[in-house]
Image (cartoon, rainbow, N blue to C red):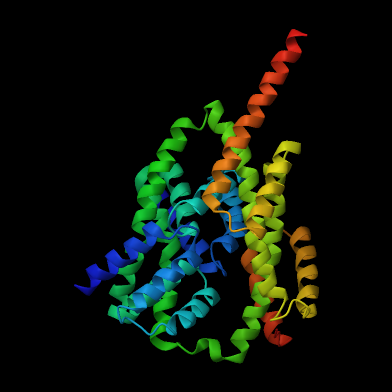
Amino acid sequence: MILLELFFEFFKVGLFAVGGGMATLPFLYELAEKGWYAPEFVSTMLAISESTPGPIGINMSTYVGFLQWGILGSIAAVIGEITPSIIIILIISKFLQKFKDSAIFKDAFYGLRAASCAMIVAAGVGIVKIAFFGEKLSDFFWQGGILAVILYVFLKKFKLHPVVYIGISAVVGIIFKFSI
Amino acid sequence: MEYLMLFLTFAKIGAITFGGGLAMLPILKREVVENKGWATEEELVDYYAIGQCTPGIIAVNTATFIGAKQKGVLGGIVATLGVVFPSVIIITTIAAFLQNFLDYQFVQYALNGIRICVCVLIFDAVLTLLKKAVIDIPSGVIFLVALVLSLFTSFPIIGIVVLAGICGISVKAAKKFKSKGGDKE
């Protein structure tokens, strides 16, 4: 029964959380009220989800599902969370493919693309803040700054797969004891 | 076979993305646009735009889009299952055996390094996408207005998307009107 409950609770999260993984946080606090875990544990789950590969929202729902019913619980929660997305996006995708050559659609996407880039940049500013600055904006993480410049030069020179740079950065972080 | 390829490609993307949907952008660009040719850079930006203002996880929405474009409904489902598959494995392992893995000092050092790298990768990906999205003065203005709105106000994302779409249609209509008028002169 709890598996069904997990599926439906996360189906709701997937249906109502607009704007990605972080938008699911309020829902996770609500689920804590069901007694599934302590509200304080949400921040631990968030920290782990942000520090492991994969979409943050999916990582968090996997965690909650696992706490309730082991690996099957994880699967139930994740399937619940992605089902609304799949349905909604499949409908939009059908629609897009049908109208993608119409002039009005192309014109709308001309504007939308620029705005989408702006929203990506705005979200990127948040990520930069976390990566380069500590509690105060005045503490610039200068070792990180040097690594960033070197990485960018290498990225432009050798077009290696992104995961190579991620691996190198992890090793550099360990060797030079990166701490903010 | 193509379904297996979709699943494996998206599983790979899910397994090497650190930092959520935005961090997935450079990896998607590499794997889906450059390696596989499943989508163009413009389409990737479009999917992000739609993914941000529809319900659900952005990375999942983008995977569904690309899968559906390749192989219809089943393709969308397979790609989505692929992108979440590594999460299930990794998080259940951590939840079962390594709940305190963040307490290890070397994990923190590594994550601090990875975060820097993710910033650089996103910066590079955004620059390429910007060249495709901001192509003239009106699109530059739309970009700047949307940037200011999303950085400094709590204007809803769906509002920005709808307004940008309307602006796009209006700008193009004005252009067509102008060039028509020009022909007559």
Q: Nearer the viewer, residue A60 or B156?
A: B156
Residue A158, image quadrant: bottom right
Location of the C terminus of chain B by quadrant is top right
Where's residue B72, x and y in %? Answer: 38, 42
Where's residue A146, x and y in %? Answer: 81, 74
**Looking at the image, residue B74 lies above or below residue A33:** above
Where's residue B31, x and y in %? Answer: 57, 55
Q: Nearer the viewer, residue A23 or A3?
A: A23
User: Left of B166 or right of it: where is B80?
Assistant: left
Residue furthest toward the left? A1
Taking the spot 67% from the left edge, 59% from the top edge, the residue there is B152
Number of numbered callouts drawn: 0
Q: Nearer the viewer, residue A161 or A65?
A: A65
Where's residue A37, x and y in %? Answer: 35, 83
Taking the spot 37% from the left edge, 73% from the top edge, the residue there is A30
**Looking at the image, residue B175 lies above or below residue A95:** above
Residue furthest toward the top? B184
User: Left of A65 or right of it: where is A150?
Assistant: right
Taking the spot 44% from the left edge, 85% from the top edge, the residue there is A40
